[in-house]
Image (tube, rainbow, N blue to C red):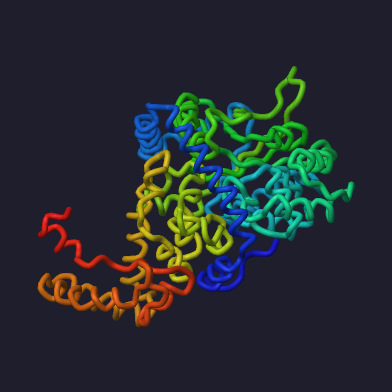
């Protein structure tokens, strides 16, 4: 898989010049926003359900150790085997060890962003284990040798025309298919033998249910069930923040998750897996392993606990004006968009990812649509402040911010600066837009800047215009 290369700014600039990417993103995110809006409008109690969902996640996090211990106890009682991993290296090692003990040559895999986060695809390849992605979008990007660009639609950067060419090149039927239904049928045909011939099936988990020791998967394609049921061994990789107290809590969270992710009332498949096959069961794995991954989550519990509420719905990506222009690969990590900008500094270090918290207009849409009310703009501002305090910002940026702070904290000087800047900026504008800012060219390299009004906001308030 070809990971994104270059700096964030280089990747973003390249993405902005990709007209095919804009078409793909407009189709995917536009459709997602429309469906979410309709689903929320049809459920008057959505805002109240959203508050309850945030409270349920906070309750689990406030009692983190208790519920994780309860989950482990009940999962072991069901016949599952539990593996604890402090970081990505330990998590991948646990999965590879289980695969080797099973003498696995092929592993089917249901979509899991945690797997991307810990680098599981690379670990499987290095161990000589053939990996088969079974989610349709993941199948597409596996054929293309790419990483996911969206947490719900990993191939959001690909148009159906792209997919048709990929399938013609890589599928055994070698047909140039133009209809979506025909492409799906081709993928189903391509994957069928692997579903039933895999030695191991690997999945993620949307929830870890403490009261039962079960894990829950939520999908629309049925590939998760075909990944987890036929193989002799089922391996679950799950972040420890997925813990919830009860099955009822999991279902309450699902109501806001699905509407935010796909605009549906419920996904096609919501499945609870609890232990391996028992005597008398017609199907199911003989071994059931759960790898519980920390990888920075206990650190987040102390520093930014709100981020651990995230249910990975993708709504913040679909509504983010930046993501919708540059797509997911520009962000460089496993998680793109606003949620990725908050998470990636934890995993990869702020010194390496300081550009991501700055990739935000602070318009607040991400928080407004988040089904568990994560204050993403606040978290991103906190990262910006930490970057400044740690000295990661370029010298020019540091000087500019210090000058801004000096001026902004002196009202008379601030008003004087505005009175000078406003008419100068207006003279640069044409037809309401500024196409080039002399001292801030990065603002207008890829977009026009709106011409400011004749009066400042403070002057308008004083005159009674607002």
Q: Quadrant of residue 341?
A: bottom left
The location of residue 70, given as percent across then percent down, is 48, 31
Q: Residue at x 50, y 49 (%)?
A: 318
In the rendered image, residue 76, in percent from the top left (x then y), is placed at: 59, 31
Q: Nearer the viewer, residue 14 or 239?
A: 14
| Quadrant holding the N terminus | bottom right
Residue 341 in the image: above or below residue 311: below
Q: Residue at x 35, y 39 (%)?
A: 62
State which quadrant residue 24 falls in. Answer: bottom right
In x, y percent, where is residue 357? 41, 63
Is 405 displayed left or right of 154 in the figure?
left
Count the marks: how many?
0
Observer-nearest residue: 359 or 455?
Answer: 455
Position of residue 228 in the picture relative to residue 37 (left or right): right
Q: Position of residue 284 (x, y in %)?
A: 73, 28
Q: Is residue 446 above or below residue 374?
A: below
Q: In the image, is residue 286 above or below residue 24?
A: above
| Residue 342 as seen in the image, left or right of residue 105 | left
Residue at 49 percent across and 38 percent down: it is 36
Q: Determine whether, in the image, residue 139 is placed left or right of residue 458.
A: right
Q: Is residue 416 above or below residue 76?
A: below
């Amino acid at each position: 898989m070809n990971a994104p290369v270059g700096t964030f700014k280089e990747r973003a600039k390249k993405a902005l010049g990709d007209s095919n990417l804009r078409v793909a993103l407009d189709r995917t995110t536009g459709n997602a926003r429309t469906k979410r809006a309709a689903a929320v409008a049809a459920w008057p109690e959505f805002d109240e359900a959203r508050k309850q969902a945030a409270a349920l996640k906070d309750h689990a996090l406030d009692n983190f150790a208790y519920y994780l211990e309860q989950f482990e106890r009940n999962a072991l009682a069901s016949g599952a085997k539990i593996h604890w991993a402090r970081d990505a290296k330990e998590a991948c090692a646990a999965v590879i060890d289980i695969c080797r003990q099973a003498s696995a040559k092929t592993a089917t895999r249901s979509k899991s962003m945690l797997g991307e986060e810990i680098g599981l695809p690379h670990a499987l390849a290095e161990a000589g284990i053939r990996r088969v992605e079974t989610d349709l979008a993941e199948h597409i990007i596996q054929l293309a040798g790419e990483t996911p660009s969206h947490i719900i639609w990993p191939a959001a950067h690909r148009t159906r025309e792209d997919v048709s060419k990929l399938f013609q090149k890589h599928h055994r039927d070698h047909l140039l298919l133009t209809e979506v239904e025909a492409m799906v049928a081709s993928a189903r045909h391509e994957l069928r033998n692997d579903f039933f011939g895999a030695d191991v099936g690997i999945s993620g988990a949307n929830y870890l249910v403490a009261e039962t020791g079960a894990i829950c998967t939520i999908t629309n394609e049925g590939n998760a069930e075909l990944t987890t049921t036929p193989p002799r061994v089922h391996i679950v990789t799950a972040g420890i923040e997925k813990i919830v107290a009860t099955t009822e809590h999991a279902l309450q969270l699902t109501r806001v998750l699905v509407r935010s992710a796909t605009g549906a009332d419920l996904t096609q498949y919501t499945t609870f897996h609890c232990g391996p096959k028992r005597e008398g069961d017609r199907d199911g794995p003989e071994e059931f392993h759960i790898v519980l991954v920390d990888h920075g989550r206990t650190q987040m519990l102390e520093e930014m606990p709100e981020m651990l509420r995230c249910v990975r719905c993708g709504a913040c990506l679909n509504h983010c004006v930046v993501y919708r222009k540059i797509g997911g690969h520009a962000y460089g990590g496993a998680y793109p968009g606003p949620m990725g900008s908050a998470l990636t500094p934890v995993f990869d270090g702020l010194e390496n990812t300081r550009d991501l918290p700055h990739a935000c207009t602070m318009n607040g849409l991400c928080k407004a649509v988040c089904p568990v009310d994560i204050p993403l703009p606040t978290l991103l501002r906190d990262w910006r402040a930490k970057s400044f305090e740690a000295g990661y910002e370029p010298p020019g940026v540091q000087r500019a911010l210090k000058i801004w702070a000096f001026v902004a904290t002196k009202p008379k000087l601030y008003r004087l600066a505005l009175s000078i800047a406003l008419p100068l900026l207006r003279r640069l504008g044409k037809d309401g837009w500024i196409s080039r800012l002399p001292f801030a060219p990065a603002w207008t390299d890829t977009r026009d800047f709106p011409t400011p009004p004749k009066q400042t906001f403070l002057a308008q308030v004083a005159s009674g215009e607002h």
